[in-house]
Image: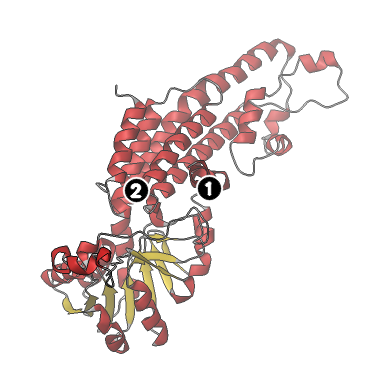
Amino acid sequence: MPDVQSLVNDFVNQLKTRKIEGSQATAKQTAEFLRSVISQQRVPHTNQAAALINAVRAVGEQLIAANPVELAVGNIVRRVLHIIREEDHSLTTAAVAGLGLTAVSDDENDGDRDDHPVLSAAVVAAAARSTLRPPSLQTLLEDMPDSAAIPPTSSSGGESEGKSRSLDKGSIGRKLKHDVIEAVNELIQDIATCYDQIAEQAVEHIHQNEVILTLGSSKTVLEFLCAAKDKKRSFKVIVSEGAPRYQGHLLAKELAARGLQTTLITDSAIFAMISRVNMVIVGAHAVMANGGVIAPVGLNMVALAAERHAVPFVVLAGSHKLCPLYPHNPEVLLNELRSPSELLDFGEFSDCMDSSSGAGSLHVVNPTFDYVPPKFVSLFITDTGGHNPSYMYKLIADYYSADDLVVKQRTVTGS
């Protein structure tokens, strides 16, 4: 079996060389890779959750540092860490509840106490580690059924203690890794089907004879619009070309091929056309915890035009794009610069770029992303439904643990 670190190095190289790009592809392959790491990880009989968390965190820091602008990598790393904590908590709670034990009162003498089994230290410690707000021992005991209050006879003390240890090292130890892998499989399936789940909501938001504006190319937007057409909605789509990569040309061609009335415009014509538009529907690269959006360059201009003309601005994003960080966090890389060759031909302008001649030089800046503040967003549509920007931080809290938000910060401070 290949060494885990060699697999990590190969995946890191793919991220660095941009052989894996796009939030959906990056998220899916990251989840599959972490599943492989977990399956190959050898863990001790005790503290298995801590061992898995440390292994995933160590690998995750390397993946995040390889391509910080692909925020989906960090999202999936933190989602997997959250899965491990939740599965450990579920197993520990089930094991404690299954012991059928009760607390021993303080006024009992030592002889009586020896006749009653007690919760093992491993179980109690696991319960304390497993969640951000772990249940206290008192709460766990209070939640037990009444039958648990019947003290066992002294002859069963050894058997009960053996049962406790067996649950600690046997059932919990063997089942945790399996359950984590199963949960990661569900995560991978959710990522793969997020387009379909978002598209199912199209008929609720797109109505007859509307005019919809979008920018660039997004598979989520493509499937969303086509799903509305399949439901016999008749509407028009205006596609802004998304210079300098002109991804809008691809989207416009695909929409026209699938029978939608499509108009292609230049990015500079957005303000001229926005007054005819009923709704703006766009994709996103990432959604931050404050409801802000990191999206392809040019979308902030679209958001400004929509806000100026009171046009609803709707963002489609799968749950793997929900980032638990804020845009002001120093560890968040909001942008990157692409090759100047996308803007102009170097051979034609090479004489303008030579600063050694003493004349003025030409500099080319080609940013990849825009940041759209939450105040410009009317609605987020995710695979879990529609949400207001102010609700995003609550939705994000369901997917991540606070203890796992330091993964990226450790990478930054250590580099």
Q: Is residue 173 above or below residue 295?
A: above
Instruction: Examine the image and state in which quarter residue 136 appears.
Output: top right
Q: Position of residue 359 (x, y in %)?
A: 27, 72
Q: Position of residue 205 (x, y in %)?
A: 34, 74
Q: Is residue 378 above or below residue 197?
A: below
Other-residue count near label 2 (Cα within 10 Å), few / some / many at <14 / 14–19 / ≥20: many
Coloring basis for residues: secondary structure
Instruction: Examine the image and state in which quarter residue 119 appears.
Output: top right
Q: Is residue 344 visible?
A: no
Q: Identity of the amino acid at label 2?
A: Ala
Q: Identity of the amino acid at label 1?
A: Leu
Is residue 174 rendered to the left or right of residue 360? right
Give the residue pinned by disc 1: 405
Q: CA distance from mark 1 to mark 2?
A: 17 Å
| Residue drawn at point x = 49 percent, y = 52 percent | 331
Q: Secondary structure at mark 2?
A: helix
Give the residue pinned by disc 2: 27
| Residue drawn at point x = 34 percent, y = 72 percent | 299
Mark before the other along the chain sequence, 1 or 2 = 2
**Nearer the viewer's eye, disc 1 or disc 2?**
1
Q: Is residue 226 above or below residue 10?
A: below
Q: Position of residue 108 (x, y in %)?
A: 86, 21
Q: Position of residue 182 (x, y in %)?
A: 39, 36
| Residue drawn at point x = 68 percent, y = 39 percent | 143
Q: Is residue 274 visible?
A: yes
| Residue drawn at point x = 32 percent, y = 89 percent | 275
